[in-house]
């Protein structure tokens, strides 16, 4: 069994700040989509436009999606672990901490 000494207020504040920063990923996705569309239109080449769109959908979009999922899991799992710690349930806190680092499959 792990021995923990957590500053609950500081931990909760960090999770909240991280979640707020994570929301910016949605703006980045919109900006990226806009930039890809603008570049595709400006290049006047169907091949380059298709390559840009493929790079966005097959790579860059996936990176952002995975970053968002990992950040969401980290925030949710950490918040849950802190809440269980605060409630005094160390086993549940350890389980929540373990799930905080998992990446969704799919």
Image: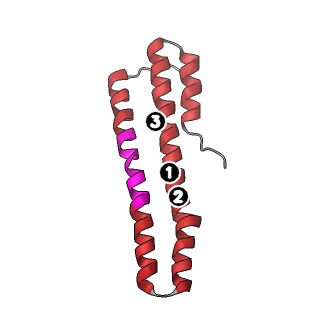
Q: Which residues are magenta?
A: 19-30
Residue at the (41%, 59%) spot, across then down: 30
x and y, in percent, of residue 48 in the image: 52, 83
**Residue 71 lies in the magenta-colored region:** no
Tag 3 secondary structure = helix
**Residue hosting label 2:** 63
The span from disc 2 to disc 1 (Cα, nearest Å) is 6 Å
Above or below 31: residue 84: above
Residue at the (46%, 36%) spot, across then down: 75
Residue at the (51%, 80%) spot, across then down: 49
Is 23 on the left or on the right of 63, as rendered? left
Residue nearest the observer in this picture, 87 or 55 = 55
Tell me the number on the disc at residue 29: none
**Residue 24 lies in the magenta-colored region:** yes
x and y, in percent, of residue 24 in the image: 37, 50
x and y, in percent, of residue 31 in the image: 38, 62
Q: Alpha-carbon neighbours of circle 3 within 10 Å: few (<14), some, or many (≥20)?
A: many
x and y, in percent, of residue 100 in the image: 54, 35
The span from disc 1 to disc 3 (Cα, nearest Å) is 12 Å
Above or below 98: residue 46: below
**Residue hosting label 1:** 67
Q: Mark 1 and mark 2 in contact (Cβ < 8 Å)?
A: yes
- Which colour style is shown? secondary structure
**Residue hosting label 3:** 75
């Amino acid at each position: 069994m792990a021995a923990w000494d957590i500053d609950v207020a500081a931990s909760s504040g960090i999770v909240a700040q991280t979640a707020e920063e994570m929301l910016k990923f949605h703006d980045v996705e919109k900006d990226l989509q806009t930039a890809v569309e603008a570049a595709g239109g400006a290049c006047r080449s169907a091949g380059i436009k298709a390559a840009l769109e493929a790079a966005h959908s097959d790579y860059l979009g996936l990176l952002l999606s995975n970053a968002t999922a990992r950040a969401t899991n980290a925030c949710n799992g950490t918040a849950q672990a802190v809440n269980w710690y605060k409630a005094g349930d160390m086993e549940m806190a350890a389980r929540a901490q373990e799930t905080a680092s998992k990446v969704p499959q799919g």
